[in-house]
Image (spheres, rainbow, N blue to C red):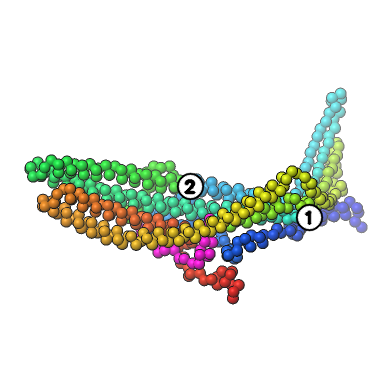
Amino acid sequence: MIDKKTFLRASSAGVLATFAAGCGHLPIAKPAFEAMETQRAGMPTDWTVAPMTGDASSVLADYSVFGDKQLSAYIQEALENNRTLRATMENVNQSRALLKQTKAGLWPSLKASVGATESRPTNDFGNESDLYTFGVTGAYSVDIMGSLDASVRASAAGLRSTEATYELARRQLAATVARAYFAVIEQRQQLDLTRRTLARAQDTFRITQTRFDAGAVARDELVLGQSSLASSEASIIAQEASVRSAIRALESALGRFPQQKAQVATDLPATPPSPPLGLPELTIRARPDVVAAEYNLIQTFGNTRVVHLTPWPQLNANLGLALNNTTTTSTSGLFDFDNLAFTIGATLAQTIFDGGAIQGRIEAADAQQRSALERYGQTVIDAYGNIVSAIDALNTLQARDKSLQTASDAAKESLRLAELRYNEGSQSLLDLISVRDRADSAESQLIANRRSILEQWIVLHLALGGDPTKPTPLATLAATAEGAKKK
């Protein structure tokens, strides 16, 4: 036969086990998020988000199309060392911790305490007494109204939004490094062009000086040659400063202290093929900024739901376990569970009058919800606009490249002929300098345009939010939820 003490202990243990195991499966009211669907009419209903793992290999793959190992190494270094990106990662960690904190409300709390106290009367200091205490309390609040579930949904959406923002920061950092890398290459090519111009000016001035010494040309031509030479030397100084500035910008993006030690390739790489395009509504969902806006919207709806529950009577059902033991002099029986008590209760509370504070919070939440919807809609519109503008700009730059190449080749030939005529004495120095300036300007524009093409390719890549190393077939309407419904 089982005695009363053994039965109580077994029952207490069973209640605790059932309480801890079953609390996560209690029915929880779910807030109505249908309003968000109706207010987003026309947008895809099968919105899915690719997992943003934080793996650097996915970002590195995007830029492997340039075939430059040094560029890939710099991007990886930036992803590991850039302080701003690290700070953004801490925002993700903070959101993850807040979600964990919110989810804690879905589980019971269980606390235990042990204490010991020694007391001595002041009039009989040798007469001591010892007091020992042991307590266990457990509690669980059932989410009847669904406010906790809405808070969890909002926190989960906030975490996803922060992750998307971090992914956007990673992609933007990689783009910044690539642009800075190409800028250094271009500035060095411009410096090489300026040095060649200086070398030609020096050769021409020697000829002019010889002719002046021989009395074949007037002093004004000698002074013109000196001016041209000095201008070329000044251009060298300015261009060298531009190279140093570009290197510092690259090192700063890498998370380094600027030391002018970054190494880059000699030539700009060839422009990769344009990233694949799909249906617009499928294209924009790959953009982290749109993903972040979507989750911000969900988070706002969840928070608004919590506020809208405020004026309703708050019904709370509480389940609890409590044990408080106290012994004197000895700890015998201190950990006895005979006094364990199971409690269950419910409270219904409602604010009668608060001067309109609750209504004010509801109106503010509704305004914030409408604001989130408008921001989300504008984000989508901006995404479309960015893609169209990026495609148009890339096509324009690529079309200009052919004309600039033709102009540069023709200007070089004109310069070669002009130098021959000047050396023969059949052309003035002023005409030669004019032809040289046109040739240098044409080549400089060609170099700048090719760097702009690479930068615009990066802009288009960011606008599309895809992976150019994995060409995919064009999406069809059947791939969307709307298309599937029509089958």
Which of pointers 2 and 1 lies earlier in the amino acid sequence? 1
Q: Which residue is mark 2?
A: 82
Is 380 left, or right, of 261 in this rendering? right
* Occupied quadrant, residue 396: bottom left
Question: Measured along the vertical axis of the image, is residue 57 above or below residue 261?
Answer: below
Q: Residue drawn at (13%, 43%), measured in percent from left and top?
A: 209
State whether residue 346 appears in this view: yes
* Occupied quadrant, residue 132: top right
Q: State the residue in front, 7 or 174.
A: 174
| Residue 309 percent across, percent down from the top left | 73, 53
Question: Which stretch did the figure color magenta?
Answer: 269-291
Question: Measured along the vertical axis of the image, is residue 124 above or below residue 337?
Answer: above
Is 364 left, or right, of 430 in this rendering? right
Secondary structure at numbered mark 2: loop
Q: Quadrant of the N terminus?
A: bottom right
Q: State the residue in front, 326 or 218.
A: 218
* Occupied quadrant, residue 231: top left
Whole-Å distance between the Cαs marked 2 and 1? Answer: 47 Å
